[in-house]
Image: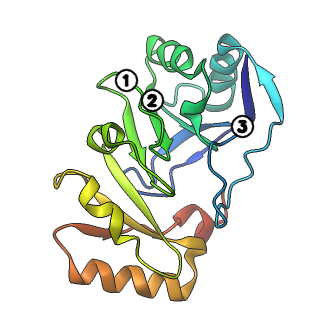
Amino acid sequence: MLQLAEIFYSVQGEGTWTGTPAVFVRLAGCNLSCAFCDTDYALAFFASVDEVVERVRAEGGDCPMVILTGGEPLAQRETRALIDALRAEGRRVHIESNGTLPTDLPDDVWLTVSPKERLAPAMAHRANEAKLIVDGRVPDEWIAAFPAATPMFLQPEGNKPANVALAVEAAKRAPARLRLSLQTHKFIGVR
């Protein structure tokens, strides 16, 4: 059984896929406890892999993109079975991870890594994009951990003006490496 916080249909508000419709499967629990976390990843219900796939179908119809997020979605043992079941149904699976748990993933699974306290090198090298949270400072210590070709987004915590200013200035100093990613879903008032 999977531990879940919520399943809902919306649009991706961050990173490369901003504006793309997606079904979000928020798994409960995390192996970190970051002070700035804006996500309620508390356990709300249990469901089997088949029940989650059915719920994805019910929420998003034929929407091809499904985003597994959390908390930390790779912390649950059955997440791989869920990935396989969603892919078998023709869905494009995206995972948003803190990158602490080395996990083999199929090549067609999009991996967003947002490092916080620590980072597994294998996950940094596998990442399709990196999301660095700017909270009073730019976490420059993570930049070198990712290959140069990995798109690297600076995301101001809470879209706070001071964090936005820090992120913009950092991106302007390193335009070939860094990009700004605002949480657009919060600006437009959707989950």
Which of the 4 image quadrants contains residue 43? top right
* Residue marked by disc 1: 104
- Tell me the element at label 3: loop
* Residue 28 - label: 3
Residue 123: image location, x then y, percent: 36, 39
Q: Earlier in the sequence, mark 2 or mark 3?
A: 3
Q: Residue at x 34, y 67 (%)?
A: 141
Q: Earlier in the sequence, mark 1 or mark 3?
A: 3
Residue at mark 2: 93
Lower position in the chain sequence, tag 2 or tag 1: 2
| Amino acid identity at mark 3 | Ala
Name the one closer to the observer, 163 or 188.
Answer: 163
Q: Which image quarter holds the C terminus?
A: bottom right
Q: What residue type is disc 2 on?
A: Val
- The CA distance from mark 2 to mark 1 is 14 Å
Closer to us: 184 or 112: 112
Q: Nearer the viewer, residue 164 or 65?
A: 164
